[in-house]
Image: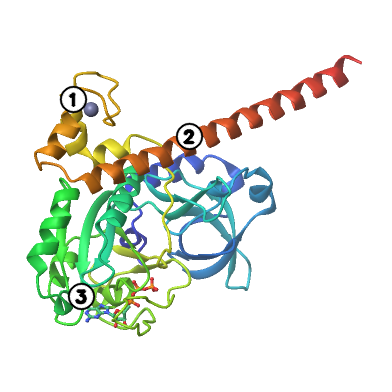
Amino acid sequence: MNIKSLGLTTFFEDQIKGFSEENKYENCVPARVSLEHKHAYRVISENGEWLASVSGLYAYEAINRAEYPAVGDWVLVEKMNGEDRAIIHKLLNRKSQFSRKIAGREIEEQIVAANVDIVLLVMSLNADFNIRRLERYLVAAWDSGATPIVILTKSDLCKDVDHYFREVEAVAMGVDIFITSSYTGEGIEEIRALFKEGVTGALLGSSGAGKSTLTNALYGDVKMDVSDIREDDAKGRHTTTHRELVALPGGGCLIDTPGMRELQLWDQGDSLSSSFKDIEAFASDCRYRDCTHKSEPGCAVNFAIDNGNLEQARLQSYFKLQKELAFLERKTNAQAKLAEQRKWKQISKGQKKKYK
Ligand SMILES: Nc1nc2c(ncn2[C@@H]2O[C@H](COP(=O)(O)OP(=O)(O)OP(=O)(O)O)[C@@H](O)[C@H]2O)c(=O)[nH]1
Ligand SMILES: [Zn+2]
């Protein structure tokens, strides 16, 4: 396996060079995480594919989940003699990460795919089509640091593709939209052309949207298991059980991710603005700078709705995501404060001991 075709770019090579002066990694080689399942990994290196787990020191030093390797990560590993196993000693800095809040009530980041150049948001042109869900995925995609694109699949099942295309166009400003069918082959070449040497893409979308079938079409061979779904309600069975990275024969890498029931946001930046440029543009004309666009006089956003230039449902979606992000920020701030307090307690305990 040529390591460059796995996406080892100068960004990572420079980090590796930096480590070469440290003796503690002298028995290590770079490898890319291709599969992750409950802290058990499969990694691909120039010398082969191995099962891997993190070293004891790594586990001791990792504070939260996001510090553990995820699919797409570059790591330094040490192969165990005579075994197809390796120990992960070091995680290289990521250049991008697609994250979500872990399912359930806990406030923690889950990295769905790391070091991705293109986030391929997959949605089918049948009952799975949901513009509000796409808005949510777009916010997360903009936050990842990778370039989002939208792939509308199963065009062979859809009679009015243009109508859906226009709906997507209205919410995905500045994002390329592709129409595909893995059955007729429509659009597959265009997607394949995005995968130049060293480019990594991640497929994201609901279960049954056609991600694995698309991977197979791009791969030109059977690589992922695909399950039949009942087309009438478009509910897929969960076939993809873990994230998996494959090197495409024509160049580039693809990460197939399991369909998500829900994508809860884990936002670090200003991605809401990137996804809702239209609303932000209207808002800049509101009379009050702190206008909440609820009932203030001179609100240009509400004016746009009255004039039919903005959909009420889109504004509601914006409010909803804004609220979710504000909640997340309050929670993470509270957590950070607690962690800080704990740290100071530890330090002052230590100092008291010292001065006794
Ligand atoms: N008609 C039609 N059906 C498709 C197309 N692509 C996928 N399907 C069907 O849609 C169903 C789900 O496809 P998958 O590729 O397993 O979907 P997935 O997004 O990988 O689903 P998960 O692995 O559960 O996340 C399967 O029955 C496929 O045969 C297409 O282009 N046209
Ligand atoms: Zn306003």
Name the side, left or right, on which 115 lies relative to 51: left
Q: Where does label 3 land, which residue?
A: 154
The amino acid sitting under disc 2 is Glu
Estimate the x, y position of residue 348 in percent, counting from the top left: 78, 20
* Marks 3 and 2, the one that precedes in the sequence: 3
Q: Nearer the viewer, residue 2 or 260?
A: 260
The amino acid sitting under disc 1 is Ser
Estimate the x, y position of residue 108 in percent, counting from the top left: 55, 46
Cα gap from disc 2 to disc 1, whole angstroms: 24 Å
Q: Where does label 1 land, which residue?
A: 284
* Marks 2 and 1, the one that precedes in the sequence: 1
Q: Nearer the viewer, residue 272 or 82?
A: 272
User: Residue 329 bears which disc, if any?
Assistant: 2
* Marks 1 and 3, the one that precedes in the sequence: 3
Estimate the x, y position of residue 200 in percent, counting from the top left: 31, 58
Q: Which residue occupies 15% across, 42% down?
A: 310
